[in-house]
Image (spheres, rainbow, N blue to C red):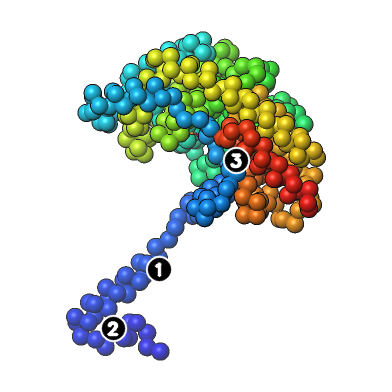
């Protein structure tokens, strides 16, 4: 067969230019590739399940969807009205870019809010407004680690942490959190893993997926370890206002912690605006300076309209009013979901968490009898065959295998129980 170059050599000039262009096009197309950096990040089973659910719903089927990590009630109506009123009266101001660091008015309000709830001081200048907690996490990973660095993440943990660690090329050391220990990490393990070689430790309380609140003694230990070893502490407080028993633990109150602390926060859960993508991060000045530089490149600034909404939530008492209304409803739903597991899946290990949005039952007993490779396959099968969607535990870390993450705030109590009953029947038939 004639090679391309021989073939081109036999043509006249116009044809040669044409064929050169064509072969260059195919060469580039051939060489063009997806980066290894992107390729190494697996497709999230969470996103796959979400699209499966929407497909099932579009086909007219009733789906019991426990996968969403978001509040089950809409934001406060008064808050929506105030925000729209502001937009109408100040449309230019309301919709223009804000500074990269965020509206000064909102950062001021956050500073006061942290003082009110946590009792500690954060200068508005040490706060950066982000597009949800996720942007705060990205900015923190980017600013505080280099590829190959060692970090400590608890297992199980919010699934995004593992993928971010991969994306930023980090080596992860872990301490497990077991249901038998009410998901508290082992203190000896923390002492062993947090060392001078650690770049940062990432903790979450209340937690996702376990919804546990870290014990005060463990928090004190972590605070000491990060100071003694000169390690950054990333504290993800996305669920800090969704507490049903006990209290959020403010690690910021322990001496010198603030020197090393990066507080990652979200407006998605407490004032229920996950779709507006808003959160904030506070940290020592030099860290905020770096984040400001990076955020300028990633998103310029967060939605100004969303920032005004958060500002009104914090300065009018609406946040408190709203939480007073929704927290008892979420608590009731937690109780119903917990009792439903005990009643319909008697062999599951289930722990009633004091906070958050999720139950994280261990279904090892049932999984062993199932003809599936792992909990991810099981979650797909359950959605397809029974239209009950729950997240597989192993996406939250190896020790989450054979668990399911069940959002308990997302539907009214009767429906909440029905889906769990269907799951119980399905498993007992096996
Ligand atoms: C622990 C934790 N941190 C951060 C986030 C990110 O939330 P957002 O980006 O909506 O603020 C989530 C979302 O579910 C979460 O569970």
Q: Which residue is rendered at x = 32% and y = 75% of the image? A: 23
Name the residue carrying label 1: 30
Look at the picture and state if 103 lies above or below 338: above
Q: Earlier in the sequence, mark 1 or mark 3?
A: 1
Q: Nearer the viewer, residue 87 or 333?
A: 333
Q: Quadrant of residue 12?
A: bottom left
Look at the picture and state if 76 lies above or below 363: above
Q: Quadrant of residue 176?
A: top right
Q: Nearer the viewer, residue 360 or 102?
A: 360
Total residue callouts = 3
- Which numbered marker is on residue 66? 3
Count neighbours of disc 2 (C-alpha within 10 A) and say few if under 14, some if 14 to 19, many if 20 or more.
some
Determine if residue 379 is in view.
yes
Name the residue carrying label 2: 8
Q: Which residue is rendered at x = 77% and y = 31% of the image? A: 180
How far separated are the C-alphas under marks 2 and 1?
19 Å
**Horizontal side, residue 163 vs residue 9: left or right:** right
Q: Earlier in the sequence, mark 2 or mark 1?
A: 2
Which of discs 3 and 2 lies nearer the camera? The answer is 3
Assign a secondary structure to mark 1.
helix
């Amino acid at each position: 067969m004639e090679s391309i170059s021989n073939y081109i050599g036999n043509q006249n000039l116009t044809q040669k230019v044409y064929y050169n262009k064509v072969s260059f096009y195919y060469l580039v197309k051939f060489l063009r590739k997806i980066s290894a950096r992107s390729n190494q990040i697996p497709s999230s089973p969470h996103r796959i399940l979400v699209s499966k659910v929407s497909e099932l719903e579009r086909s007219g089927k009733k789906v019991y969807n426990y996968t969403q990590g978001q509040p089950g009630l809409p934001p406060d109506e008064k808050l929506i009205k105030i925000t729209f009123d502001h937009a109408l009266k100040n449309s230019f101001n309301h919709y223009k870019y804000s500074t990269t660091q965020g509206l000064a008015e909102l950062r001021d309000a956050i500073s006061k809010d942290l003082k009110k709830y946590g009792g500690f001081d954060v200068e508005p200048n040490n706060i950066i407004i982000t597009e949800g907690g996720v942007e705060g996490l990205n900015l923190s990973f980017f600013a505080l680690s280099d590829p190959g660095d060692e970090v400590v993440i608890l297992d199980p943990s919010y699934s995004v942490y593992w993928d971010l660690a991969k994306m930023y090329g980090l080596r992860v050391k872990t301490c497990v959190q077991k249901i038998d220990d009410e998901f508290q990490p082992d203190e000896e393990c923390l002492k062993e893993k947090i060392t001078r070689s650690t770049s940062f430790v990432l903790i979450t309380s209340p937690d996702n997926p376990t919804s546990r609140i870290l014990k005060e003694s463990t928090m004190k230990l972590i605070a000491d370890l990060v100071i003694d070893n000169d390690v950054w502490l990333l504290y993800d407080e996305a669920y800090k206002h969704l507490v049903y028993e006990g209290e959020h633990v403010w690690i910021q109150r322990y001496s010198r912690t603030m020197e090393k602390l990066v507080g990652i926060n979200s407006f998605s859960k407490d004032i229920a605006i996950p779709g507006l993508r808003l959160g904030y991060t506070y940290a020592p000045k030099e860290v905020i300076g770096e984040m400001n530089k990076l955020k300028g490149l990633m998103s310029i600034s967060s939605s100004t309209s969303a920032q005004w909404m958060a500002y009104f939530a914090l300065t009018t008492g609406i946040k408190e009013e709203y939480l007073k209304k929704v927290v008892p409803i979420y608590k009731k739903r937690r109780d119903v979901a917990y009792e439903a597991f005990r009643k319909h899946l008697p062999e599951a290990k289930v722990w009633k968490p004091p906070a958050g949005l999720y139950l994280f039952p261990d279904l090892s007993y049932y999984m062993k009898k199932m003809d599936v490779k792992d909990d991810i396959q099981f979650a797909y099968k359950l959605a397809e065959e029974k239209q009950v969607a729950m997240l597989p535990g192993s996406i939250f870390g190896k020790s989450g295998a054979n668990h399911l993450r069940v959002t308990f705030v997302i539907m009214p109590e009767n429906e909440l129980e029905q889906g769990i009953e269907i799951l119980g029947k399905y498993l007992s038939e096996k």
